[in-house]
Image: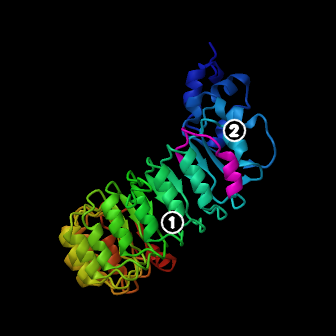
Amino acid sequence: METHISCLFPEILAIIFSYLDVKDKGRVAQVCAAWRDASYHKSVWRGVEAKLHLRRANPSLFPSLQTRGIKKVQILSLRRSLSYVIQGMPHIESLNLCGCFNLTDNGLGHAFVQDIPSLRVLNLSLCKQITDSSLGRIAQYLKNLEVLELGGCSNITNTGLLLIAWGLHRLKSLNLRSCRHVSDVGIGHLAGMTRSAAEGCLSLEKLTLQDCQKLTDLSLKHVSKGLNKLKVLNLSFCGGISDAGMIHLSHMTNLCCLNLRSCDNISDTGIMHLAMGTLCLCGLDVSFCDKIGDQSLAYIAQGLYQLKSLSLCSCHISDDGINRMVRQMHELKTLNIGQCVRITDKGLELIADHLTQLTGIDLYGCTKITKRGLERITQLPCLKVLNLGLWQMTEILYEL
């Protein structure tokens, strides 16, 4: 008896189709009626994000998405009203509008006119015309929002954060990258420091404040007092924070990852404060902090020895600092020391001898290392990623 794939039950076909990439999922629907029916099974499209260009009316678009159970949408270009999307997908869970430069407060206001309880994720990154007015709408109608991306929305102010703190109590992740009007007052709103006006976003687990230039150590005081559930904090390029601010962060027991990249006023003293606290950090990035030196590595070995990822690119560390750190860092898996020009083969030998769990190391721009040190590094049993930079990689490929 001859058998053919078309003889399979639709449920079996759906399982097979679920392993295809998005384009191929669409193509199999065009083969025949049986495959089309199987490909429209919701299990085939589970977790898929539809990427759409909204240029002209397409009456079949949203019914087709709903039939497939698609609830995540990214708008690549927006030439129609946003309300067209919201009305077409009443049970939408994730809406990505990143880079929709023509989106305005008016357009968003016409879209969000009633509660949308299903929406959990909203990405407005680089929607540069969005202001606090839109955040008022979001806070009023998107009460179940858990992730809000506002990176590059440079017109957002402390008033907008007050509105978020008033309405979005279930928020777990907030990105305010380059929102340069935001100051300590706004962070205070988020942390519940103004309870008479807003309860705050006390369930936040991830907060990105990269390049928020007006923030000072007072913001860190607010964060430490009010945002006790915070796990990930990105303060990179925040030039207004200093070593004193690290005292506030040093007792945030739920904090797992801290990014201090290019925070010019963080020095060995700040690392000392972190190490003397009750932190259980898994990841720390102090790259391009030019006041970080060998003493910081000693402090890390004493109080932050549970780190799994450590980035020290362009810091003023040497083989001596490596020597003071490596014997305690038994869980370290990723070490980035690119452009640390004082590191030599001796430092690499110490790393190879003691950091046996390393899976990745960045040595780009370490000009004093030679073939001898690299040979030792390549013998690390778990190593998967070695970044040397193109100019060195060619030579190493020939020599090793």
Asked if 273 appears above or below 255 in the picture, the reply is: below
Disc 1: CA contacts within 10 A as few (<14), some (14-19) or many (>=20): many
Q: Secondary structure at mark 2?
A: helix
Across the whole image, how many numbered discs are drawn on residues? Answer: 2
Q: Amino acid at mark 2?
A: Gln
Residue 280: percent from left, percent from top: 25, 61
Q: Which residues fall within the magenta stretch?
A: 105-121
Q: Say which residue appears at 60% left-offset and 32% top-offset.
A: 69
The residue beneath circle 2 is: 87
**Residue holding disc 1:** 158
> Which label was assigned to residue 95?
none
Is residue 346 at least partly visible in the picture?
no
Quarter occupied by the C terminus: bottom left
Q: Nearer the viewer, mark 1 or mark 2?
A: 1
In this image, 158 relative to 106: left or right? left
Classify the position of the N terminus by image quarter.
top right
